[in-house]
Image (cartoon, rainbow, N blue to C red):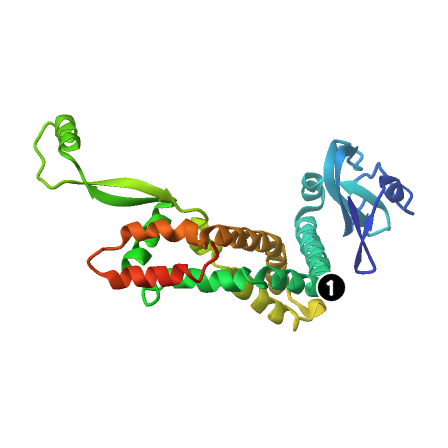
């Protein structure tokens, strides 16, 4: 790839032959007889080209196109540039890279701006529907809320999320044979009654409860609110810092959408009566109101 600075505008050139045919270009410049004028381009190739300085000619895959003060042009690597043209070359190279990055970022932002309607439509597609992101977020929020779900259940789910396990366990009293086996392994007596935790179910889609899969954070905070802000931006007026910030946001759009799409899929697995019914194993039978509350929540879910 070749990028040229022509009249303070950056352009891409496809072929090296286009550079060789430029007026004043030479591939055999004596650096002791010419003074650096400016860096006029940059190139990056998979195939190497020879350095244009007469006492180097080392092949390299990336470098700069420079113009001398008397109108000659050639190509050099950054090491040769620093060696023969000193600090001036280094500073110009840095500025050229900054200008190139700014140009690329503006192109990225302009493309993203043109596709905002498409992005908003994709977000709405994820959110809409009987079991879309809006519904999933509402139900997931309820699963985390002790005011809507028994505290024992919210704590159980919190622990499973913290441990990143889908296994739902329940305690039961060990029988005498099991206790004797445990005592034999430990080499000491244990008090009775003794309780064991057993896996009673595997809760599918638990990932919908993970913090990084929060649908409001993904679709509203990271996308919709940023879109509203981005629509007010004047791309050509942005400073380098803001160009970089918005470019990073644009690059984050696809992975954010992918994460949201996965979260919706997890939510649809999680939020079914058959999947969450095993949580009833965790209810303390001494408080029938908790069972009623959980069963009431389950009735709001598809089978």
Q: Quadrant of residue 95?
A: bottom right
Give percent across and percent down for residue 298.
40, 59
Which one is nearer the viewer's eye here, 260 or 51? Answer: 260
Q: Residues within 10 Å of mark 1 (few under 14, many from 20)?
A: few
Identity of the residue drawn at 22% across and 55% down: 285
Q: Quadrant of residue 222?
A: bottom right
Position of residue 291 in the picture relative to residue 213 (left or right): left
Residue at mark 1: 114
Up the image or down, 155 lies above or below 86; here it is below
Which one is nearer the viewer's eye here, 167 or 87? Answer: 167
Up the image or down, 261 lies above or below 170; here it is below
Give percent across and percent down for residue 70.
85, 51
Say whether residue 196 is visible: yes
Give percent across and percent down for residue 90.
66, 49
Give percent across and percent down for residue 276.
39, 52
Which one is nearer the viewer's eye here, 123 or 92? Answer: 123
Say whether residue 144 is visible: no
Position of residue 107 in the picture relative to residue 225 (left or right): right
């Amino acid at each position: 790839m070749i990028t040229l600075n022509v009249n303070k505008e950056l352009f891409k050139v496809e072929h090296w032959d286009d550079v060789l045919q430029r007026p004043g270009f030479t591939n055999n410049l004596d650096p002791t007889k010419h003074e650096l004028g400016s860096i006029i381009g940059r190139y990056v190739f998979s195939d190497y080209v020879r350095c244009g300085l007469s006492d180097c000619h080392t092949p390299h895959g990336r470098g700069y196109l420079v113009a001398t003060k008397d109108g000659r042009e050639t190509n050099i690597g950054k090491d040769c540039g620093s060696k023969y043209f000193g600090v001036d070359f280094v500073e110009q190279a840095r500025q050229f890279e900054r200008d190139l990055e700014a140009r690329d970022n503006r192109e990225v932002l302009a493309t993203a701006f043109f596709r905002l309607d498409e992005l908003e439509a994709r977000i709405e597609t994820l959110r809409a529907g009987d079991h879309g992101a809006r519904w999933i977020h509402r139900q997931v929020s309820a699963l985390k809320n002790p005011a809507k779900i028994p505290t024992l259940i919210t704590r159980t789910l919190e622990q499973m999320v913290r441990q990143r396990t889908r296994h739902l366990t329940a305690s039961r009293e060990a029988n005498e044979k099991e206790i004797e086996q445990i005592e034999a392994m430990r080499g000491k007596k244990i008090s009775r009654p003794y309780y064991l935790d057993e896996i009673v179910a595997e809760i599918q889609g638990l990932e919908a409860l993970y913090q990084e899969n929060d649908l409001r954070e993904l679709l509203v905070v990271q996308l919709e609110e940023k879109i509203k802000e981005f629509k007010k931006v004047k791309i050509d007026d942005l400073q380098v810092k803001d160009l970089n910030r918005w470019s990073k946001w644009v690059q984050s759009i696809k992975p954010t959408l992918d994460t949201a799409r996965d979260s919706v899929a997890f939510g649809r697995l999680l939020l079914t009566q058959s999947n969450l019914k095993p949580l009833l194993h965790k209810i303390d039978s001494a408080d029938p109101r908790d069972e009623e509350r959980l069963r009431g929540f389950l009735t709001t879910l598809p089978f």
